[in-house]
Every structure is written in C-alpha cells, then in structure tokens.
C-alpha cells in the first residue's frame, strides 16, 4: 500500500504545470490539495484528509524536487510585433500553390510572417498591415481567423538545443497562464503568437526568470 506522501509526490511529478508552479513557489497548496485529494485516496485505498496532503506538499518544498531541472536559458533579445492575425485554411493544391508565393513580395523583412503546414490545414500568421494582400492573394475564405494577437520573439544562445529551450519556455508560459495561439520555432529564436491580453504576463514571466534585455517594435 502506497503512503499518502508518496502518492502526493507521484501526482505532482506527473503534473508538469503544477510542478513548475510548485518550483516557482506560486502553487496554491490548499487548492492543489483539494484538486488531487480523490486521486490520493485512490492510490492509497483509504480516506486522506486535505490537511495531510498540504503537509506533504509543504515537506516537498524543502526537498530536491523544488530545484528546477530545466536548462539555464540566456535570452539575448526579446521583441514584440503587433498587431498580428492568424488565418487557418483548408489545405488544397490551389491554396498550397498560392501560399508558396506569399513571402517574396507581400511581406517585408521586418514584418512577422509564418506558415504552418499540416496534413489538412495551412496556417498563415501575418502582420495586420499585410492582411488585405494575403486574403486577396489566397482568394478563399479561411476556416478560422484570430485577431488581436502579438508575436513575441525570443532569441537565445546556440549553446542550448532549441527543442530544450522550447520545452522550458512553453512550461514557463503555461505556468503563468499565457494564451498561446501558435508557435514559430527557429534554430536560435522562437516566436510565440499569443493573445494581446497575455502580453504583459508573458513578458513578466520571461523578465523574472530568463530575460537579459528587451526591445519592442510595433
């Protein structure tokens, strides 16, 4: 039979967002205890008081679990581009052909522009000032349109693999409840396409843990 403290540890380690919040000392222990109480009881096969779970969480805060296992990220540059709009199109031969000719003459190098191509959909992320040109060029109504977005671009050292940076920053932004619409990954930079009303908390999160300097552009 598993002990209550061991059950709490198991559940916390398997909950990435809660674990990151716990490590950053922003997890509400009482609320989290209420959330996992039934799961703890299932694992221990007996009733477990909420207070017992809170005590277990408090003890874990003094353990090695509190130390972050994420790589140290050095952000060289942080920039924003807004307003940005995201369009989702049904992938067809015609839309694929039209999308392939967008970048060369519709978008300037300083504008945010990205294409995400999946099995059945194509997502176009573009600065608002190029919206009319893009829509006219594609010539079909998008399946989905999301406005009021911001492109938040993080540039980082090439000493850490980009996938590790992406995993770490995704966890960080999720912990701070940043609404991420899309992601444009690169070799040494990642652009997070986020809701405009999430920008302040996103920058605060990055400033608090990883940022070295910041610049913004409209």
Image (cartoon, grey):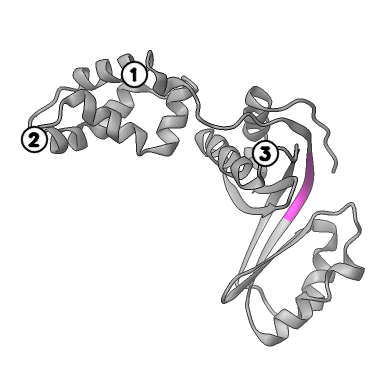
Q: Nearer the viewer, residue 141 or 17?
A: 17
Magenta run includes residue 150 = no
Left or right: where 36 falls relative to 63: left
| Whether label 1 touches label 3, CB < 8 Å | no
Task: Identify the residue position indicated by label 3 in the image.
Answer: 160
Neighbour class for label 2 at 10 Å: few (<14), some, many (≥20)? few
Q: Which residue is mark 1?
A: 60
Q: Earlier in the sequence, mark 1 or mark 3?
A: 1
Distance from disc 2 to disc 3, alpha carbons, whole Å, reads 44 Å
- The residue lying furthest to the front in this view is 159
Task: Please name the residue shown 85% across and 40% down the image.
Answer: 217
Compare residues 218 and 162 and report the one nearer the observer.
162
Instruction: Where is residue 186? Give x, y as percent.
Output: 73, 52
Quadrant for residue 122, please give it: bottom right
Q: Secondary structure at mark 2?
A: loop
Q: Secondary structure at mark 1?
A: helix
Looking at the image, residue 98 sits to the left or right of residue 25; the answer is right
- Provide the residue designation for mark 2: 45
Q: Residue at x 32, y 15 (%)?
A: 58
Marks 1/3: CA distance? 29 Å
Q: Specify whether residue 207 is in view.
A: yes
């Amino acid at each position: 039979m598993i002990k209550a403290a061991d059950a709490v540890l198991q559940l916390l380690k398997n909950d990435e967002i809660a674990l990151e919040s716990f490590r950053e000392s922003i997890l509400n222990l009482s609320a989290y205890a209420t959330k996992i109480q039934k799961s703890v009881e299932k694992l221990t096969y007996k009733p477990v008081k909420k207070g017992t779970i809170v005590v277990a969480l408090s003890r874990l805060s003094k353990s090695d679990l509190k130390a972050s296992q994420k790589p140290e990220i050095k952000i060289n540059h942080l920039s924003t581009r807004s307003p940005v709009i995201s369009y989702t199109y049904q992938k067809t031969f015609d839309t694929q052909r039209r999308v392939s000719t967008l970048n060369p003459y519709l978008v300037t190098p300083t504008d945010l522009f990205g294409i995400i191509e999946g099995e059945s959909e194509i997502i176009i992320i573009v600065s608002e000032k190029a919206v009319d040109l893009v829509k006219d060029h594609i010539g079909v109504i998008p399946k989905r349109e999301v406005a009021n977005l911001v492109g938040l671009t993080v540039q980082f050292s090439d000493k850490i693999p980009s996938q590790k940076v992406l995993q770490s920053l995704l966890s960080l932004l999720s912990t701070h409840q940043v609404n991420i619409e899309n992601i444009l990954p690169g070799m040494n930079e990642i652009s997070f396409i986020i809701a405009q009303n999430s920008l302040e908390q996103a920058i605060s999160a990055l400033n608090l843990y990883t940022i070295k300097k910041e610049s913004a552009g409209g």
